[in-house]
């Protein structure tokens, strides 16, 4: 009897190696080029070092574990004392030490200078690819600084601690800590985005600007951190208050954590519902001017929503490109099959356009900090527009990248599961898509000069690409039709952003990328689905540029 040949049935074949131990900055040519073009070239060495640290296998694993083992609420200690503690996996603290140590919570404020916000933005895009949950307390702290400046008292103490690069998770008075983090609490269950309907009440309780707050917050991010900016109804109207976790004497403030939210994604980060039971808070800004005060914080956090989505998209595209260069099917590598090349090239174009757009917005924040009126106008108009568009497009890209990996993309232990569950959040957080588009219209109505700041970017490349020129003319004609603007606000903002992305790519990206974008997004009948780049684009040059090799 002839023996059958032995088969190695458990030998692993045709599976790509893990994408790890690589540099997230130096292998991302779109990011390195955009950072240099937008004024952050001076930070190349630091960004390269951070990209190497983020790409280490140990760091990637810490991000996975922080997401895999979410925080838990401990309401009482074993003796029955109310403690309202949030307990985290050690990997969360490791990641928080990394992001705070890099200064992403305060760097541009503590060490201001040309390109400071843009350099931070580039690092933020990279960090999103590894552990995005830790960006919530980081972002809120970054945004809180302008609102807290000049307030004195407790705010001054907190600002001093924010300015360090020390992550100090101890639950003690902020004056005794080596570092501090700040959050926000606006959302209530009856109002959502309509914060004017908030029912939390603030009653004056002293001559030092102190109030006692009573009410409920439906979403209260990071209840474990040192203080929050919250909105409450004072006698003079809706106002902003600084509510610390612990009072200056070290006693626990009357902020009761009712539960932690069981979210779809963002699982490493604690989001909660809280009750204020005569909680102490200090007025920030003028009484009755709470919305303008906290919206100053929101401008910066909206920037980070766009940056985070650009980072999540890049992370997904990097995984897809890594996969197709290693995986074989039908006797060829996937990358050598024309339709797959079209798909991943299209994803790479979308990712580079998002990265460049988000960093251009960050550069305007640098200009605004330096006193530029034009950049301030650009920020007013384009912050909600960029947030809307990048956060709307990125989920489609992440889903397409998951499909490239097939079943391997749709498993929890793979990297795309985390990105897939995280990617819808930035479109919701800090104002949904409708809120963003309406804010664009408000900016145009209140300050017509803002549109001029936007058009200056487009006109800087007039004549460089006929498709871009035609799209810009059509856009201006759209805005000249004043009727029904609210009804078509999403379409207007979409066209604003694709034209701006085209102008940025024509000016700063390689010809192959700019041509593919203009040919697909600005000319002809754009299919919107990925993998619909028209004939004639250099798809292989695009994917070779984008590959994280």
Image (spheres, rainbow, N blue to C red):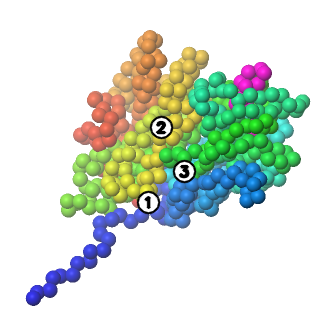
**Residue 302 picture location, percent across and down:** 57, 35
Circle 3 is placed at which residue position? Answer: 267
Report the side of 391 relative to 517 (left or right). Answer: right
Of the image marks 3 and 1, the number of the one nearer the N terminus: 3
Assign the N terminus to one quadrant of the image: bottom left
427 or 506, nearer to the observer: 427
The residue range painted magenta reads 231-244
Q: Residue furthest right?
A: 207
Residue in front for this viewpoint, 248 or 378: 248
Which residue is drawn at the image coordinates 23% and 60% (left, top)? Answer: 329
The CA span between labels 3 and 1 is 14 Å
Mark 2 or mark 1, which is nearer the start of the sequence?
2
Q: Are marks 3 and 1 in contact (CB under 8 Å)?
A: no
The crowding category of the residue bearing disc 3, from other C-alpha atoms within 10 Å (few below 14, some 14 to 19, many at least 20), is: many
Image x and y of residue 57, in percent:
51, 65
Query: Which mark is on residue 391?
Result: 2
Query: Is 241 part of what is drawn in magenta?
Result: yes
Q: Which residue is mark 1?
A: 413
Is label 3 in a helix, a strand or a loop? loop
Dominant SS type (magenta): strand
| Secondary structure state at the residue bearing disc 2 | helix
Measured as percent of width and height from the top left, residue 47 is found at: 57, 53
Please state the horizontal and vertical placement of residue 77, each as a whole percent of the image.
73, 57
Asked if residue 34 shows in the view, the reply is: no
Tell me the crowding category of disc 2: few under 14, some 14 to 19, or many 20 or more residues within 10 angstroms, Cα based.
Answer: many
Front in this rendered view, residue 30 or 88: 88
């Amino acid at each position: 009897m002839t023996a059958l040949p032995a088969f190695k049935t458990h030998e692993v074949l045709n599976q790509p190696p893990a994408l790890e131990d690589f540099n997230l900055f130096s292998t991302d040519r779109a990011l390195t080029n955009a950072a240099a073009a937008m004024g952050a070239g001076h930070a190349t060495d630091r960004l390269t070092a951070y990209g190497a640290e983020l790409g280490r296998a140990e760091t990637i694993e810490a991000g996975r574990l922080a997401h895999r083992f979410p925080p838990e609420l401990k309401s009482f200690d074993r003796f029955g004392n109310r403690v309202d503690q949030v307990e985290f996996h050690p990997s969360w603290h490791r990641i928080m030490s990394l992001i705070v140590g890099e200064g992403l919570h305060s760097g541009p404020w503590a060490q201001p200078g040309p390109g400071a916000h843009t350099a931070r933005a580039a690092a933020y895009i990279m960090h999103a690819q590894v552990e995005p949950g830790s960006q919530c307390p980081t972002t809120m702290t970054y945004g809180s600084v302008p609102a807290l400046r000049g307030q004195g008292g407790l705010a001054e103490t907190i600002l001093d601690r924010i300015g360090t690069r020390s992550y100090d998770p101890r639950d003690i008075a902020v004056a005794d800590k080596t570092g501090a983090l700040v959050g926000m609490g606006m959302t209530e269950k009856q109002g959502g985005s309509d914060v004017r309907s908030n029912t939390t009440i603030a009653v004056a309780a002293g001559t030092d600007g102190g109030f006692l707050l009573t009410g409920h917050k439906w979403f209260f991010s990071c209840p474990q951190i040192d203080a929050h900016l919250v909105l409450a109804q004072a006698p003079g109207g809706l106002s902003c208050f600084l509510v610390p976790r612990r009072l200056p004497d070290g006693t626990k403030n009357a902020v009761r954590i009712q539960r932690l939210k069981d979210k779809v994604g963002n699982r490493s980060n604690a989001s909660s519902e809280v009750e204020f039971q005569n909680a102490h808070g200090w007025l920030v800004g003028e009484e009755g001017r709470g919305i303008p005060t906290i919206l100053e914080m929101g401008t910066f956090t909206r920037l980070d929503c766009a940056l985070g989505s650009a980072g999540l998209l890049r992370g997904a595209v990097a995984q897809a490109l890594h996969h197709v260069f290693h995986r074989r099917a039908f006797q060829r590598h996937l990358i050598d099959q024309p339709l797959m090349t079209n798909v991943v090239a299209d994803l790479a174009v979308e990712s580079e356009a998002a990265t460049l757009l988000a960093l251009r917005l960050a550069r305007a924040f640098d200009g605004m900090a330096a006193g530029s009126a034009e950049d301030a106008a650009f920020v007013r108009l384009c912050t909600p527009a960029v947030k809307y568009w990048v956060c709307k497009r990125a989920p489609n890209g992440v889903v397409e990248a998951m499909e490239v990996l097939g079943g391997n993309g749709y498993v929890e232990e793979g990297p795309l599961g985390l990105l897939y569950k995280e990617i819808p959040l930035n479109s919701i957080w800090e104002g949904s898509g409708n809120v963003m588009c309406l804010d664009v219209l408000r900016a145009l109505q209140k300050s017509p000069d803002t549109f001029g700041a936007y058009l200056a970017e487009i006109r800087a490349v007039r004549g460089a690409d006929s498709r871009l020129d035609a799209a810009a003319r059509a856009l201006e004609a759209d805005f000249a039709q004043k009727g029904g603007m609210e009804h078509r606000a999403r379409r207007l903002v979409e066209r604003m952003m694709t034209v701006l992305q085209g102008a940025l790519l024509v000016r700063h990206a390689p010809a192959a990328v700019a041509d593919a974008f203009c040919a697909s997004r600005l000319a002809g009948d754009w299919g919107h689905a990925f993998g619909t780049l028209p004939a004639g684009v250099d798809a292989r040059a695009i994917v070779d540029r984008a590959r994280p090799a």
